[in-house]
């Protein structure tokens, strides 16, 4: 107790000064319109900023929930369209929504991990797309997750066709830029122009015909070459890949078994 009294006596002048400052501030803000409005304005600004931050956080989580719901609705809508088309084409495709949880874009052998596995009916060899176009093909499957070899993997080959004349080519990746791939096996007599649209060919059971792949960025045909050197700008932006759909073909296993017997 004596120690406390000594401390109070020692700093009494300073404490009195602080008390007078507080009292003066309160009197000034209470009796003077401008300082009071300034204080209230500052306080209101802080409260508004705080509310804005809370709103942004809530919007972020709400937006994520909306995106997941939208992805599921897109897959459901695509399934309805496929059901109507199957009566005419005889093909039976089904789409399962999923989310990319891990991926690479700067390696020769890139991969994408998605949050669906064998428990969801996912199998090796099934195709994967998103709302923009082709993503890749399922390589390995676990109970809850699967690994996709994207078209930006030097091991992946994809059969494609030109929309303007149905000419077939093979999409490959040279391991450099994840925005572009190369279209091979396009003979010299074929006229190729920048802006030509490339889609899946439908010549394999992995993807139906017509899924967007990309746009011809450039084509080079040197004298004496038998094939064009074609650079394709991919529709899928792998730097922003998030929600995908697994393409399930009811006839895929049967078709692959038949093809396997020809190897």
Image: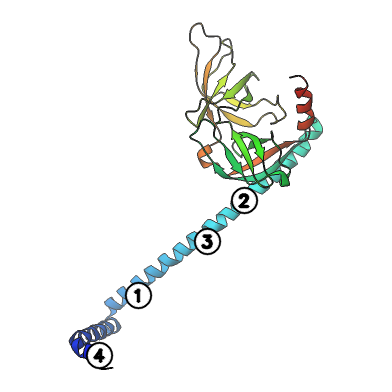
Q: CA distance from mark 3 to mark 1?
A: 27 Å
45 is higher (above) or lower (below) than 192: below
Q: Which tag is nearer the camera, tag 4 or tag 3?
A: 4
| Secondary structure beneath label 2 | helix
Residue nearer the viewer, 92 or 100: 100
**Label 3 Cα neighbours within 10 Å, binned few <14 / some 14-19 / many ≥20:** few
**Label 2 Cα neighbours within 10 Å, binned few <14 / some 14-19 / many ≥20:** some
Q: Which residue is mark 3?
A: 58
Circle nearer the N terminus (4, 3): 4
Q: CA distance from mark 1 to mark 2?
A: 42 Å
Q: Which residue is mark 2?
A: 68
Split into 4 quadrants, where in the image is the C terminus? top right
Residue 142 x/y as whole percent: 67, 43
Q: Which residue is mark 4?
A: 3
Split into 4 quadrants, where in the image is the N terminus? bottom left
Residue 134 in sight: no
Q: Quadrant of residue 100?
A: top right
């Amino acid at each position: 107790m004596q120690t406390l009294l000594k401390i109070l006596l020692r700093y009494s002048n300073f404490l009195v000064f602080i008390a007078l400052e507080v009292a003066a501030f309160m009197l000034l803000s209470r009796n003077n319109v401008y300082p009071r409005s300034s204080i209230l304005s500052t306080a209101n600004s802080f409260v508004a900023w705080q509310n804005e931050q809370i709103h942004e956080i809530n919007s972020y989580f709400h937006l994520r929930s909306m995106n997941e719901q939208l992805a599921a609705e897109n897959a459901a809508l695509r399934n309805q369209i496929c059901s109507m088309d199957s009566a005419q084409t005889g093909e039976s495709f089904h789409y399962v929504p999923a989310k990319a949880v891990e991926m690479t874009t700067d390696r020769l052998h890139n991969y994408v991990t998605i949050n669906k596995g064998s428990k969801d009916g996912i199998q090796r060899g099934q195709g994967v797309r998103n709302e923009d176009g082709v993503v890749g093909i399922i390589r390995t499957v676990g109970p809850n997750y699967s690994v996709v070899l994207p078209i930006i993997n030097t091991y992946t080959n994809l059969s494609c066709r030109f929309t303007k004349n149905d000419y077939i080519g093979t999409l490959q990746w040279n391991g450099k830029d994840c925005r572009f791939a190369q279209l091979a096996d396009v003979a010299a007599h074929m006229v190729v122009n920048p802006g030509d649209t490339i889609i899946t060919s439908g010549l394999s059971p992995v993807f139906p015909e017509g899924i967007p792949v990309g746009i011809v960025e450039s084509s080079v045909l040197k004298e004496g070459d038998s094939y064009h050197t074609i650079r394709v700008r991919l529709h899928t932006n792998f730097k922003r890949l998030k929600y995908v759909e697994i393409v399930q073909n009811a006839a895929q296993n049967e078709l692959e078994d038949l093809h396997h017997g020809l190897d």
